[in-house]
Image (cartoon, rainbow, N blue to C red):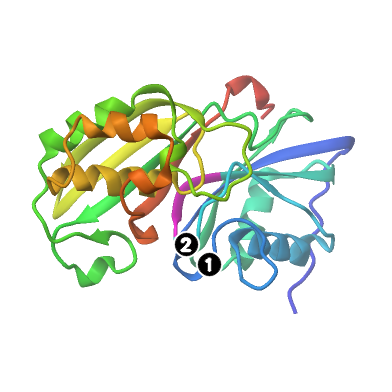
Amino acid sequence: MSRMVIFAVQSMRNNRYFFEIAYKGTRYHGWQMQANAVSIQQVVQDRLRQITGRSITVVGSGRTDTGVHAKQQFFHADFEKALDAEDFRYHLNAVLPEDIALRSVRRVREDAHARYDAVSREYVYEILTEKDPFRINEAYIYPRAIDIDKVNAAARLLMGKHDFESFSKVKTDVNHFCCVVMQAVWETTEGGCRFTISANRFLRGMVRAVVGTLLMVNEKKIAVEDVREIMDARDRSKAGRTVPSEGLYLNRVIYPEEIFID
């Protein structure tokens, strides 16, 4: 049985902290807590209870689906007393499984929110054009040549403010489908290519549907200019397939610096 550790250094009314974590999503059913499946949120909350002796609810910067990875994800949690951030990071890492790592702990304003205060999020989708046994569950195996110039021409049509309903899961609880895309670019990598997209917000399934649609351009199933028509249709059936989850990474989440105290 692990020893319960007390982290109090100062008593305050409310102490909110942002936790930066990274995880390999292969073994998990996404970030969000679920009744009959193991999620990242559940594991984190269980381990927080293990080392503090208290039930602590965490709020993530956003959801990731089953099998999706995160190089940078944030969640916030409240504590009755202030933490020694580095000491807390060390002890939480000691009990987290090997595929989840806590990168940093930073105190923030009491009203700071991991989801609503995020200015932008960046996702990366990794593709390999040849099978690689050392990258199983880390990239999508797509055994075709990719015309980078053509898929980049199509990706540029995503830039700016648009309605992305055509790229959203059909059953999703949102008030609107508008997103502002700041970056959408393909680049070649060793053994394949990488698609990077950043926006103020993302819809459920959006990145994987976007990638599937842009790959249709590569396969000459649709023309570059058809991407704009697909967006205008606001119909998921008009867009491309949803590519596999193993190639997708939540890569970066940006916050205004003024919310941080430490």
Q: In this view, does 99 lie to the left or right of 134?
A: right
Image point (44%, 57%), residue name: 68
**Looking at numbered disc 2 in the image, what kind of residue is underneath it?**
Gly
Give residue 125's position: percent from left, percent from top. Answer: 32, 48
Residue occupied by mark 1? 28
Q: Which of 139 and 73 is in front in this view?
A: 139
Q: Image quarter for residue 50?
A: bottom right
SS for callout 2? helix
- Percent of width and height locating residue 54: 84, 60
Picture residue at 16% right of the left edge, 47% below the top: 221
The x and y percentages for residue 23 are 49, 57
Whether 51 is drawn above or below 62: the answer is below
- Judged from this view, the residue extending furthest toward the bottom is 1
Which type of secondary structure does the marked residue at label 1 adopt?
loop
Judge by depth and name the residue closer to the eye, 169 or 153: 169
Give the numbered dot on residue 68: none
Q: Principal SS element in the magenta part?
A: strand
Q: Give the range drawn in magenta.
A: 68-73
Mark 1 crowdedness (10 Å alpha carbons): few <14, some 14-19, many ≥20: many
State the separation of the CA atoms marked 2 and 1: 5 Å
Name the kind of residue labelled 1 in the image: Tyr
Marks 2 and 1 close (CB-CB < 8 Å)? yes
Answer whether residue 244 is magenta in the image. no
Residue 25 numbered mark, or none:
2
